Amino acid sequence: MRGKTFAVLRFLVDHPGQLVTKAALLDAVWAQTSVSDTMPTICVGELRKALSDDARIPKFIETVHGRGYRFIAKVTVAATLEALAPWQAAQHTPVPIMVGREDQLAQLHGWFAKATEGKRQVVFVAGEAGIGKTTFVRAFLDSLPQDVVRIGRGQCIEQYGSGEPYMPVLEALTRLGQEPGGERLREILHRLAPTWLAQMPALLTEEERARLQNEAPGTTPQRMLGEMTGAIEAMTTDAPLILLLEDLHWSDFSTLELISAIARRVEPARLMILGAYRQVDMLGTDRPLRRIKEELELHNYCVELRLKLLSERNVAEYLGIRFSDGATAHVFNDLAPAIHQRTEGNPLFMVNVVDYLEAQAPPLDASEIEAPRGILQMIERNFERLSADEQVILECASVAGAEFSAAAVAAALMRPTSEVEACCTRLSRNEQFIRSRGATEWPDTTVAGAYAFLHALYREVLCDRVPPGHLIELHRRIAERVEAGYGERAGEMAAELAHHYERAKDNPKAVKYFQLAGERALARGAMVEAERHYVRGLELISELPQNVDRDRRELGLQVGLGLALWGGKGWGHADTHRAFTFAQALGEKLGETHQLIAVLNGLWISAFSRAQMRASQELAERMARLAELSDDRGLLCVANYAFGTTLLWRAQFTKAQEHLDLASSYFDEADTRPLIQLAGNSIVVIAANVALHQGFPDRARHLINATLQFGKHRRNSYHLAFARMSACLLSIRLCDQQALLMHAEELRSLANEVPFFKGHVEYFADVALAMSGKFEDGLARTRRANALWESIEFHLSRTYVLQTEAEFYASDGRVDEALGKITEALSETEEVALRRPEILTLRGDLLVQNGASVSDVEAAYREALECARAQNNRWDQLQSTIHFARRLKSEGRTAEAFTLLSEIYNWFTEGFDTRDLKEAKSLLDELSISSGGL
């Protein structure tokens, strides 16, 4: 056979059972020659022919698709092989040596075995910089049978990792979709996670992507989570799946939320998530990775594998493997103690020390090697051994990012892209500072190699070498080239462009792209990332000169921040209120009606959530005045919806209905503005509440059912959850336990997508238990619900919580404590008048239970009745009258009770199948008999 083919065989035999990449073969056999990347494939084909080896059922050489080859036959070292020593002269990069990790590797295999049985596993591999996390994880992956497991690899990137939601997961899935068998993954994504597939342009044609973006439903953080958790489970039905997410300490918050959501599910899935991170970078209490990991650990949803520093024995083992014979081995035999002392067992530092010593002439003195804190200087020494051209390109690459395109570096250096690519390819093949990451393709048809630094330390050292003035210029050139390359699609790179323009001291451009990055994050439902972008944009805009353009840009940033906080922290959260307050001042200054109404709507929902009904009404009135001046039907819809909702809770039902009718007449489904859609799709829900209190339960049920059907048709999780919540409240008022349980269960599934309603789920579960007379666990559930509500400052729930606590205390015979809760609840209903008659009626019941005087009890019931009558609240009037009539009956005042109850009962024209009207009819029959047929 040809000499090069035999050299490939020898290299494979020298590394039996190990994965040998094509790059390693190129460096080993063609180190001094420039050849095509297909040469290893050609030589392996010749070897298979010579050995009569079938690629489908190999006995000698196994192909690891997309990665390289593995020699699988048993290898025995014989004397005849020594005659082949000349072949060893070929210089090649050795497969990374791993020592001291046998026990941890066994643990990882054990967890993977559980994953293959359908018990999903989330494993965090932790360690300091240079501890060997990547080598360890990849050694584990290489040891798995590649034909029975699918492996998706994603990398979290510094700077941009926190700016682009789900970036490492999107990268991992895109890679899987491009591998053999990727059609199955694309089909699953199209069916179960279209929102995700739309963000993977490499898997779609332009036409498919445009169609998918038009067809995909509205994006929320919860929808993204819901889609992907289901899709990943589907991916594991054909084969076990491993998702490797490296450098999680740089992860965006959305990716961490996805990991948490996947870990918490109980459905079988042959899935393992491997997340590697640096411990030192997540020690702060405000680090989201730390919080999420600790919470998952607390509930046994994940395990952490901490890699320790190598021992002196491990260092000696490494040296023994690396220098197994010859003069070099003799030189290094006694250096293990000194190398360990100087590196403290950090594998990266150790390898750098050994590389440095190997390049020196004997005798070697390890005592002269600097301690670990000097590793940066050691990296500089290795860097200085490169050519001047390589140094310039790597320094510029460090400015471009942890991952970079050769086109961006070429633009920064004003050199041909081909020159930069050739240099970077050479460095990556030699595993010097960078590695290849395939290719990048920009919308302007630019295609260039993509690369990434092998370790953050390398990039940090090189970036620090660039003079400040030159650094600014490089950032500017990179930003301008990326912006030009993406053209009208520059928004897709908004986070990266914001980063470069900020460091180029071009604050106007940086602000522009921080706002775009925030808008993109909002569109994906990534509220935490959106908040960060908007905050940084606002920090930079404060440095710009005062003018109308700046105010207009700041208004957009403040409104965006308010929306991000609204979705991320809650309607009534202080930060949300503060953002909209700042935006209000700007909106009034600029006089932009649409933006100002959006701001006032944010302030309205904040005040409403905090149960500040007077402030809510004032804001709604102002919105209405502005909307009338604008003559914008959509804005008129929003204003009247807000007004009607506020009046409902202030128990002004007739006026509330008038404004809701106006809002409905102004609503146009074709108006796609989110603010208008949000209001328009909620009108019917509020109208159902008004109808019930006015005494029309059948109408209320019809409106709620219509809203539920509409929500299902539109597939809008928020609107559907809002309707389910209202259906639960209606079921409680109608005392329909079966309907409550059904709606509450539906709401529970939706709460994963819309966390705002998690507190409601807990509360409705309490009430359902109470309806069946089971009070044992209710108080704990109520307090959990209240804790969730209080955390988002949803104070509108307080009267519900206080009433429920009073009922639980009363069921336990603790009537005085129950009355104390009622006193608190009545102080809350001063503004939230809607709840007052119901609370007053419960107070009368508690006074009866507590043995209060007849006059006190009667005064309590009469106060409830008068309150309901004053509100024209027929439903609460009915309930209060039933309770009072029973009390009058017990006192022998049957005629008075009959007259009182028959008056309100005869008013009703519908809802006679409801429990309250049935109870009223039964009580009337009893009173009639007791009174001699009145």
Image (cartoon, rainbow, N blue to C red):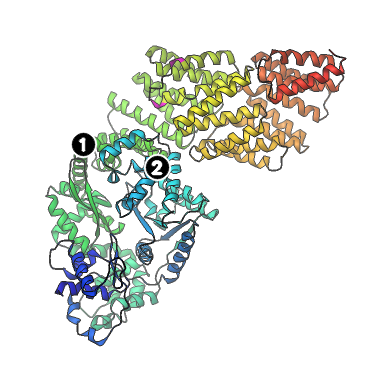
Quarter in which the N terminus is drawn: bottom left
Quarter in which the C terminus is drawn: top right
Up-down: is 440 above or below 732? below
Q: Residues within 10 Å of mark 1 (few under 14, many from 20)?
A: some
Name which residue type carries label 1. Gly
Q: Which residue is drawn at 41% across and 37% down?
A: 525
Q: Name the residue under label 2.
A: 191
List x then y, in percent, for residue 265.
51, 49
Residue 45 lies in quadrant? bottom left
Name the mark nearer the viewer: 2 or 1. Answer: 2
Name which residue type carries label 2. Arg
Up-down: is 870 above or below 195? above
Q: Residue 152 carries which label?
A: none
Q: Which residue is drawn at 17% across and 77% down?
A: 89
Q: Which residue is drawn at 56% across and 26% down?
A: 611
- Is residue 432 shown to the viewer in this render? yes
Q: Which residue lies furthest to the bottom in this view?
A: 79
List x then y, in percent, for residue 530.
38, 38
* Label 1: element kind: helix
- Is 666 in the magenta? yes
Q: Main secondary structure of the magenta part?
A: loop
Q: Mark 1 points at which residue?
A: 487
Span shown in magenta: 665-674
Left or right: where 453 falls relative to 290 = left
* Label 2: element kind: helix
- Is 626 in the magenta? no
